[in-house]
């Protein structure tokens, strides 16, 4: 496939994203590659999520993985991005590559693949389109994609490479996705160099990717329609030394004391709960999710985001605080604290008093 003939950069600047609204600028000396960290293949869907006043991230380009050659430019390249919390924001043009609908994230960078052929096709399309986009950028600026910057990073680097150099936040994209297909940043930079010379970019032979769908074994000690009853049992279990918490599934509040990928570990904990005088059983599911996600809105001028459910935990490095009106995904709860996800990738905890349903 000759991507040179199908690269389609669509200028679609954010209208409500706070990064572009801030308008800070900086000199660009290279490019930073990201993948989005969720099972989504369309640039338009990612644009829709980012294009709101509460979304605390912003990049210059979104690369589609469903349609070959499709790219959305969301900000002028002169704008300082909100992409890696560090060096990339201040110096680099940032590119977010979509991933695949045929993935299922289990938390962090861990995911399973539900259809290996479709996953391979999506990730390869995104990779190839990103190669040609970077070739276009490098030709315009007269850059050598394999050169080194004063920081020691390559002119084209990944979020993961920035992390390992101590210059970016602790994320491993796109390595965690590309390694499934044998793609590397060295190969990417070489492919960009080749594309600048007019060569067709064809994927190398790729290793087989098995379909995987892991099971999760959850230890449950009770389910209640009234949250006060669930909270009472949760407090009792904590008093016995168990790390208990309440999760909400549909109309029920369920007391959970464990979530494992190994069944034997779940059964061991279940027996410990029973020995303490409480009923318990193990449930088996293909989903790690234990809470109905909903959109929350910050109602405090300055809200601390903690790394755990309590004031004894430090603030989240990537987003230590949130401002009034910021929107977050509420993905769980522990006592008086909500677990939230910010910008689709950063997880932390905030006190329930300062979040309302948007």
Image (cartoon, rainbow, N blue to C red):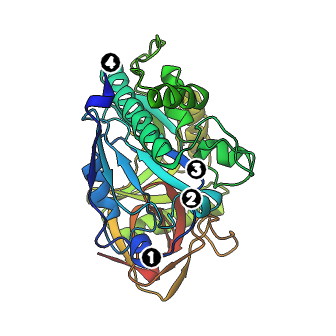
From where the camera sits, is residue 160 visible? yes
Query: Few, some or many C-alpha atoms within 10 Å of disc 3 (few <14, some 14-19, many ≥20)?
Result: many
Q: Quadrant of the N terminus?
A: top left
Badges 3 and 4: C-beta atoms under 8 Å apart? Answer: no
Q: Quadrant of the C terminus?
A: bottom left
Q: Position of residue 22 (x, y in %)?
A: 45, 78
Task: Provide the residue designation for mark 4.
Answer: 117
Q: What is the C-alpha distance between the residues marked 4 and 1?
A: 41 Å
Task: Provide the residue designation for mark 3.
Answer: 30
Pick whichever of labels 2 and 1 is earlier in the sequence.
1
The label on residue 28 is: 2
Q: In the rendered image of this protein, does residue 209 appear above or below residue 274?
A: above
The label on residue 189 is: none
Query: Few, some or many C-alpha atoms within 10 Å of disc 1 (few <14, some 14-19, many ≥20)?
Result: few
Picture quarter containing residue 146? top right
Residue beneath the point at 62% across and 72% down = 310
Residue beneath the point at 70% across and 42% down = 148
- Which mark is nearer the camera, 4 or 1? 1
Q: In the rendered image of this protein, does residue 269 appear above or below residue 200?
A: below
- Which mark is nearer the camera, 3 or 4? 3
Horizontally, residue 242 falls left or right of residue 61, namely right
Q: What is the C-alpha distance between the residues marked 3 and 4?
A: 33 Å
Badges 2 and 1: C-beta atoms under 8 Å apart? Answer: no
Badges 3 and 2: C-beta atoms under 8 Å apart? Answer: yes
Q: Position of residue 245 (x, y in %)?
A: 51, 59
Q: What is the C-alpha distance between the residues marked 2 and 1?
A: 15 Å
Residue beneath the point at 65% across and 76% down = 311
The label on residue 23 is: 1
Query: Few, some or many C-alpha atoms within 10 Å of disc 2 (few <14, some 14-19, many ≥20)?
Result: some
């Amino acid at each position: 496939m000759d991507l040179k003939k199908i690269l389609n950069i669509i200028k679609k600047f954010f209208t409500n994203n706070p990064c572009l609204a801030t308008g800070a600028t900086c000199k660009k000396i290279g490019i930073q590659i990201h993948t989005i960290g969720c099972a989504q293949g369309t640039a338009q869907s990612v644009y829709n999520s980012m294009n709101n006043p509460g979304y605390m991230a912003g990049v210059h380009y979104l690369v589609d993985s469903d349609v070959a050659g499709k790219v959305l430019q969301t900000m002028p390249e002169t704008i300082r991005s909100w992409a890696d919390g560090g060096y990339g924001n201040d110096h680099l043009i940032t590119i977010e590559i979509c991933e695949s609908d045929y993935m299922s994230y289990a938390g962090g960078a861990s995911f399973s693949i539900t259809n290996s052929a479709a996953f391979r096709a999506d990730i390869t399309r995104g990779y190839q389109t990103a190669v040609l986009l970077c070739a276009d950028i490098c030709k315009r600026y007269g850059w050598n994609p394999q050169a080194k910057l004063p920081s020691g990073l390559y002119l084209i680097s990944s979020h993961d490479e920035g992390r390992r150099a101590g210059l970016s936040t602790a994320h491993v994209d796109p390595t965690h996705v590309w390694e499934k297909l044998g793609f590397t940043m060295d190969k990417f930079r070489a492919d960009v160099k080749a594309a600048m010379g007019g060569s067709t970019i064809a994927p190398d032979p790729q290793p087989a990717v098995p379909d995987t769908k892991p099971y999760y074994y959850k230890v449950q000690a009770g389910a209640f329609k009234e949250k006060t009853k669930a909270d009472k049992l949760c407090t009792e279990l904590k008093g016995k030394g168990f790390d208990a918490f309440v999760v909400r599934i549909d109309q029920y509040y369920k007391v959970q004391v464990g979530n494992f990928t190994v069944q034997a570990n779940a059964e061991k904990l279940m027996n410990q709960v029973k020995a303490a005088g409480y009923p318990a059983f193990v449930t088996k599911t293909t989903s790690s999710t234990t809470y109905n996600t909903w959109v929350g809105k910050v109602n405090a001028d300055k809200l601390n985001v903690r790394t755990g459910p309590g004031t004894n935990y430090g603030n989240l490095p990537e987003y230590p605080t949130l401002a009034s009106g910021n929107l977050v995904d509420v993905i769980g709860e522990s006592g008086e604290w909500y677990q939230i996800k910010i910008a689709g990738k950063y997880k932390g905890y905030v006190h329930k008093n300062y979040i309302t349903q948007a």
